[in-house]
Amino acid sequence: MADTRYTPDKVWSWDEASGGKFATINRPISGSTHEKVLPQGQHPFQLYSLATPNGVKVTVMLEELLALGIKEAEYDAFLINIGEGDQFSSGFVNVNPNSKIPALIDKSGDKEVNVFESASILLHLAEKFSQFLPIAGPARTETFNWLFWAQGSAPFLGGGFGHFYAYAPEKYEYPINRYTMEVKRQLDVLDKQLSKNTYVAGEEYSIADMAVWPWYGVLVRGGLYEAAEFLQVNDFKNVVRWANQIAERPAVKRGIMVNRAWGELSEQLHERHTADDFDNKTADKK
């Protein structure tokens, strides 16, 4: 058997040819790589994103607000192709110095506000419109509990399990086993919570569901890493029930299409500027 042990150098150095799906965009420094002004539309909210799980959280939230008849939540959504390094443009970095999607400009007040990190955007919108977040008391705290549970847990699913199971240039038993164990533990935590509640934080649909579903709901529905069978997701019956319930919401069906640039053309809406775009759309082939 070949010796696959790795002994780290005393001082780490960046190997730009390290391989992997995201090798061309991963780097140990921050900041912009090129000058480019972000486009802007006419609505109060300008979203720069991609329909990854973190991006879907925000488009679902915006579509849910619009579904309630809150016209003030109208938005323009522009595609940020992270595979091509759009997130390192000077315009994007000015909105989010961390160069991660999603990023939002709120132009609805007297002064423009830049909002980044998906949970921060959800919270910002929930508080602005007093929707999908209890006003006070234990229910509000419980919503925060699960909102931040998602933020702390999902990196183990995405950057941990997803990377080593689906994207790493070589497959190794130890990291796959390590993160598989953790993801199954997280699914068990979520399953037990949903055995007692209709939604993640209780009996009301909230930003906690919007934060958790694009990762764990999509995972158990077979839409993430092609890993549903490997993880035996049907063992988590309450998560599956909840995931299917959320997936039927009309706003969720619209939200998952926005800034999507892969899959069937009928499922893609590269940019979104009005509700009519869903009915009259043609996929942008640029």
Image (tube, rainbow, N blue to C red):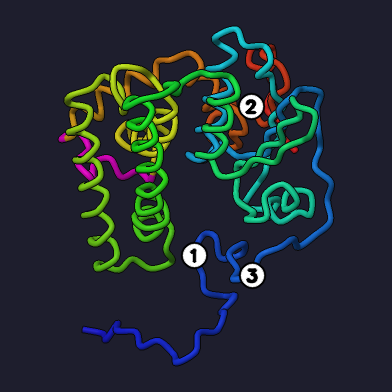
Query: Does residue 280 appear in the picture of this structure?
Result: no
Mark 2 burial class by Cα count in 10 Å: few <14, some 14-19, many 20+ = many
Magenta region, residue range: 225-235
**Residue 65 is drawn in which quadrant?**
top right
Q: Is residue 182 above or below residue 238?
A: below
**Residue 228 is drawn in which quadrant?**
top left
Q: In the rendered structure, are the residues bearing label 2 and label 1 in contact, judged by CB atoms less than 8 Å apart?
A: no
- In the image, farthest residue toward the front: 137
**Residue 221 image point, x, y percent:** 32, 31
Task: Give me the C-alpha separation between circle 2 and circle 1.
Answer: 28 Å
What residue did someone put label 2 on?
269
Main secondary structure found in the magenta portion: helix
SS of the residue under disc 3: loop
Task: Give me the C-alpha separation between circle 1 and circle 3.
Answer: 18 Å
The answer to whether 99 appears left or right of 152 in the picture is right
Q: In the image, what residue occupies the spot 42% across and 63% down?
A: 168
Choose the circle earlier in sequence order: 2 or 3. 3
Q: Tag on residue 20?
A: 1
What residue did someone put label 3 on?
29
Q: In the rendered structure, are the residues bearing label 2 and label 3 in contact, judged by CB atoms less than 8 Å apart?
A: no
Choose the circle earlier in sequence order: 2 or 1. 1
Mark 3 burial class by Cα count in 10 Å: few <14, some 14-19, many 20+ = few
Q: In the image, what residue occupies the spot 34% across and 38% down?
A: 145
Q: Nearer the viewer, mark 2 or mark 3?
A: 3
Asked whether 46 or 218 is in front, the reply is 46
